[in-house]
Image (cartoon, rainbow, N blue to C red):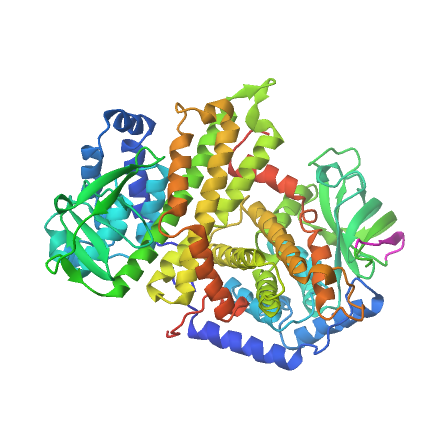
């Protein structure tokens, strides 16, 4: 029993944070937003070059075959910087799914992103820039060129989120797999990494509000010296502190693929995105009228948190999954790390 | 990260389970705060625990412990709550003063105080708060004046848990004329010493769970001072950090309650408001989150880390989850929720009510949640004082 991160895991997370601090600052987000482009090619190239996009891929697809926990820490950093590019949805979810079926398709295009249409999500994120789409039809996986589909943009509240309705016609040529386990694993990863981003978003919102509360003075002192402001921020930080270990455990246990690991992923998604919701709304409140403006960055984080709250299974869906574990499996203090198939 | 128990840890769990099954009282004891009889029953249980070498498993063997690590402590606590074993009447000693003695005490002090603590021969009360010094603990006025090899203690302590029946207390005393955080010393004194008067205070639940203590020229040997003279504040804060960060509330306590809550809801699902299911699930998740967080803290400490201001997040989290969990239980019980355990139709209802009332104290004791939020804001987030 060891609930600590390894040096290597910390190092990868540091690399991601450093790279995004340098390339995904407020000015970078605003430049991309003004340009109307889908992504910043230089930033994406740097992400790929650093190896962040190949963490979860098998070696046959050009990856380094690390685990969900390693990538979760990277996804947390992506949330912290509200990264516009689909690092998480592609390198964390769609590309590993494709690599499980056709690794050479991933190997051939190291810079490419992929997008997946999972039945829990009505729309496909970043479908227009994807090299290929993994589409769901009667339980099967179809691999489709975006040019062979009709993409209709569904504008999101989050200005960096690119959602599309995909209209397409399945054929026997497009079908590449019929393993329902692929869809299950993809859902676990999608939900887990949404949770990881939520945790990053939450911490960023608190950090932005803390920085502002130290600077902004009213009644002759920084507003952060008032207990009313302190206590709001402390409450948000408490949410974060008790979402983090759930997220890390969910990531470490995801490979178990049983009722226990599914409940933990769902718990992580609920806890992290509730933390993000509380933290982002607190940050708006602490910023006062500035918090409601487009000029202050808080809204980017609030909007991303809202989108991720309902993506990859809405809260009721995840509560049901936790409920299935609470009411359908042994509960109690000796069951914290229980697994369906207990082997050493 | 490896979230599997080793075969040795599994074997340890089995050993603890078997011993508790064979030795834990079959019938619930009277509460240790309810009467001298209840208190002494719990003392007897502490002695039984010690006879099985379960007094305080993390302490070194030479001081009455078992020399085990924090993961083993968590496993023992899980089995302890799972077995429904009695509350630890010596909690102030084993979980609060004990770790402080281990960190700050001399070998002679450890050898004198820890073994009888682990054995239940000396049950401890804490004497920190005073009528004018609650959240603002640095405002304590009780004094300790050095006289040769002794201190002469004077003052008025209050809200001292267990003090009505306990044998010893540890308190904060200041050098006369000193101010605020300076000049404070942590001194241990027997509650039957000449000059000590203990007046019980009745709690909301009817028990005499705490007391006020009057000290009039009470003599305590200088040996009983823990740490340097004047270092009392720093030592108390370390004690409080350890208390909030790890040992005061075992996650197992809430996991057992959450499992009981889930069973309660399932048994009454047909009659209960369906909206309560989401609250039951939330209560369960909260208990799990707290457990995972404590496993993370224990692992970090075992890897050489320390407990910092984040300990204050623990205290807020468990105290709030405890209230939510019990409120959910009362909502499931509906109109029977108000029944006292002795009511003819109470069934198991009364237990939930007792635990609910006790949960209301959580946001207050061990440093009010408002103080915890200040600590988080100032020391974790760096906001100005």
Q: Residue at x 38, y 54 (%)?
A: A5
| Residue B30: % across, % down | 78, 69
Residue A4 visible somewhere in the drawing: no
Q: Residue at x 52, y 62 (%)?
A: B70
Q: Nearer the viewer, residue A167 or B27?
A: A167
Does the magenta portion include A10? Answer: no
Q: Residue at x 26, y 56 (%)?
A: A66
Q: Nearer the viewer, residue A100 or B2?
A: A100
| Residue A282: % across, % down | 51, 34
Q: Is residue B104 above or below residue A342?
A: above
| Residue A115: % across, % down | 22, 48
Residue A232 visible somewhere in the drawing: yes
**Residue sitting at the far bottom:** B22
Along the horizontal axis of the image, is B248 left or right of B218? left
Q: Nearer the viewer, residue A274 or A206?
A: A274
* Numbered circles on residues, count: 0
Along the horizontal axis of the image, is B156 left or right of A316? right
Q: Quadrant of the C terminus of chain A?
A: bottom left
| Residue B69: % across, % down | 52, 64
Does the magenta portion include B200? Answer: yes
Q: Nearer the viewer, residue A113 or B242?
A: A113
Q: Is residue B247 above or below residue A274?
A: below
Res B20 quadrant in image: bottom right
Query: Bounds of the magenta span?
Result: B193-204
Res B106 quadrant in image: bottom right
Q: Quadrant of the N terminus of chain A?
A: bottom left
């Amino acid at each position: 029993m060891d609930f600590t991160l390894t040096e290597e895991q910390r190092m990868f997370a540091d690399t991601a944070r450093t790279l995004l601090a340098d390339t995904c600052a407020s000015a970078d987000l605003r430049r991309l937003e003004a340009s109307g482009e889908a992504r910043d090619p230089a930033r994406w190239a740097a992400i790929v070059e650093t190896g962040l996009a190949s963490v979860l891929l098998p070696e046959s697809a050009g990856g380094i075959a690390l685990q969900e926990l390693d990538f979760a820490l990277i996804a947390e950093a992506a949330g912290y910087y509200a990264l516009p590019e689909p690092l998480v949805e592609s390198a964390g979810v769609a590309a590993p799914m494709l690599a499980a079926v056709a690794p050479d398709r991933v190997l051939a295009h190291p810079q490419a992103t992929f997008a997946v249409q999972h039945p829990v999500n009505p729309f496909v994120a970043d479908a227009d820039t994807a090299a290929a789409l993994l589409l769901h039809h009667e339980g099967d996986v179809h691999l489709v060129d975006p040019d062979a589909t009709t993409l209709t943009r569904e504008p999101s509240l989050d200005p960096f989120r690119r959602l599309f309705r995909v209209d397409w016609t399945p054929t026997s040529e497009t079908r590449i797999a019929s393993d329902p386990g692929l869809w299950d694993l993809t859902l676990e990863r999608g939900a887990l990494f949404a949770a990881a981003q939520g945790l990053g978003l939450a911490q960023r919102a608190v950090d932005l509000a803390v920085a502002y509360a130290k600077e902004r003075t009213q009644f002759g002192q920084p507003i952060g010296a008032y207990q009313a402001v302190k206590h709001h921020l402390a409450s948000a930080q408490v949410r974060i502190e008790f979402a983090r270990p759930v997220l890390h455990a969910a990531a470490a246990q995801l490979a178990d693929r049983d009722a226990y690991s599914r409940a933990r992923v769902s718990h992580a998604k609920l806890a992290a995105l509730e933390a993000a919701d509380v933290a982002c709304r607190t940050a708006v409140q602490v910023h006062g009228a500035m918090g409601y403006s487009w000029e202050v960055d808080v809204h980017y984080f609030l909007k991303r948190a809202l989108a991720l709250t309902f993506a990859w299974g809405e809260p009721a869906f995840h509560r049901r999954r936790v409920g299935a574990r609470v009411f359908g499996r042994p509960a109690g203090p000796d069951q914290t790390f229980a697994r369906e198939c207990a082997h050493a | 990260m490896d979230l599997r128990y080793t075969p040795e840890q599994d074997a340890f769990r089995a050993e603890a389970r078997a011993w508790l099954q064979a030795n834990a009282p079959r019938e619930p004891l009277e509460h240790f705060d309810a009467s001298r009889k209840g208190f002494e029953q719990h003392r007897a249980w502490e002695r039984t625990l010690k006879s099985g070498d379960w007094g305080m498993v993390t302490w070194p063997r030479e001081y009455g412990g078992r020399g085990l690590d924090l993961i083993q402590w968590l496993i023992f606590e899980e089995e302890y709550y799972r077995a429904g074993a009695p509350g630890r009447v010596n909690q102030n000693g084993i979980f609060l003063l004990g770790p402080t003695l281990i960190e700050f005490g001399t070998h002679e002090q450890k050898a004198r105080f820890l073994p009888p603590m682990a054995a239940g021969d000396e049950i401890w009360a804490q004497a920190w708060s005073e009528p004018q010094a609650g959240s603002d603990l640095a405002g304590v006025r009780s004094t300790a004046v050095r006289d040769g090899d002794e201190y002469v203690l004077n003052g008025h302590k209050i809200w001292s848990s267990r003090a009505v029946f306990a044998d010893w207390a540890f308190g904060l005393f200041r050098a006369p004329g000193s101010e605020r955080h300076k000049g404070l010393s942590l001194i241990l004194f027997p509650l039957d010493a000449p000059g000590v008067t203990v007046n019980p205070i009745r709690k909301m639940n009817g028990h005499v769970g705490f007391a006020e203590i009057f000290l009039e020229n009470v003599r305590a040997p200088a040996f009983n001072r823990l740490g340097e003279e004047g270092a009392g504040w720093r030592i108390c804060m370390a004690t409080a950090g350890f208390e909030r960060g790890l040992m005061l509330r075992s996650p197992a306590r809430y996991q057992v309650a959450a499992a009981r809550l889930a069973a309660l809801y399932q048994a009454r699902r047909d009659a209960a408001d369906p909206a309560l299911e989401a609250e039951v699930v939330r209560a369960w998740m909260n208990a799990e989150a707290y457990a995972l967080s404590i496993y993370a803290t224990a692992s970090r400490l075992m890897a050489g880390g320390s407990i910092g201001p984040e300990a204050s997040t623990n205290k807020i989290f468990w105290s709030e989850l405890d209230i939510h969990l019990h409120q959910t239980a009362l909502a499931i019980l509906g109109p029977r929720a108000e029944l006292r355990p002795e009511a003819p139709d109470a069934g198991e209802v009364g237990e939930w009510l007792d635990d609910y009332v006790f949960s209301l104290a959580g946001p207050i004791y061990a440093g009010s949640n408002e103080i915890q939020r200040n600590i988080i804001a100032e020391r974790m987030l760096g906001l100005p004082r």
